[in-house]
Image (tube, grey):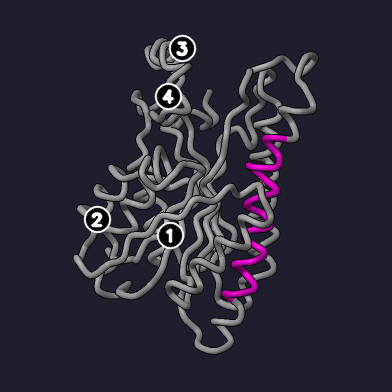
Amino acid sequence: MTNPAENKGRVALVTGGGRGIGFGIAKKLAASGFDIVITGRRDKSDVADAIIALEEARADASQVIEYTAADVSSAAAREALVRFVDDRFKRIDVLVNNAGIAPRVRADLLEATEDSFDELISTNLKGPYFLTQAIAKWMVQLQEAKRERRTILNVSSVSAFVASINRGDYCISKAGIAMATKLWASRLTQYGIGVFEVQPGVIATDMTAGVKGKYDALMETDLLLDKRWGTPDDIGTAVAMLANGSLPYAPGATLVLDGGMTLPRL
């Protein structure tokens, strides 16, 4: 395990870090010694409890925890977010593209609307893709000045490769993130910037609350090898490992964190 002191002064940006998986990731990165910037669409007052919890999770009281509202689907908001981090810290070491949404209505492919498709692609794919572009340009400049460990991590889903015909828009958005990971790894590895993807399975968050009964029942079957709900801390542990440089020689690697749900079995 990396000594948190090794990450002193290093900055991690976690989109959608005020709740759910993003919060679990931010908490583990704070425990690893990073200064943390979390974003979301809510007002700062609405994430006060999350900020307090992150401060309590810090390895050292000198670590900075910041929140700034940002809708990653907006080009202007992405630009303002990068400017905020630059003005506050003058550096960026880790980007975690976690912010994402589920469809407002789970609709069969034959009935799904363009509005839903556009909303999900804009938030789940276009936003993180172009935020990565902006952060990557900055990271390249920083690397050319001083070579250090820098990492970009994409949170997608097993839905990137497992078809769900009542939420095709979501699956396509996550499949796009999976390919974006490969593309950015191909482009940025030469600069010493690690690019990775984590694909969560069934994780207990507010986003999955509406299907809790369904998956509680399925967990009594052989759906999962590890018969429990995954937690945001499970995902945070994996992301922190990657951010700490503990998976060398693996550009573009994907970690599937699904309790064995998608493991091929006979």
Quick one: label 1 or label 3, which is nearer the N terminus?
3
Q: Which residues are magenta?
A: 119-139
Q: CA distance from mark 3 to mark 4?
A: 14 Å
Q: Quadrant of residue 143?
A: bottom right
Q: Secondary structure at mark 3?
A: helix
Dot 2 amino acid type: Glu
Place of residue 137 in the rendered image (x, y in percent of width and height, measured from the top left): 65, 73
**Residue name at image x 69 percent, y 69 percent:** 187
Query: Which residue is identified by label 4?
Result: 224
Q: CA distance from mark 2 to mark 3?
A: 35 Å
**Residue name at image x 30 percent, y 74 percent:** 8
**Residue name at image x 21 percent, y 63 percent:** 59
163 over 23 or under it: above or below: above
Query: Which residue is identified by label 3?
Result: 214
Residue 228 vs residue 168, the one in the foreground: 168
Residue 238 vs residue 167, the one in the foreground: 167
Query: Which residue is identified by label 1?
Result: 242
Circle nearer the viewer, 2 or 3: 2
Badges 4 and 2: C-beta atoms under 8 Å apart? no
Residue 169 vs residue 202, the one in the foreground: 169
Query: Which residue is identified by label 2?
Result: 55
Dot 3 amino acid type: Lys
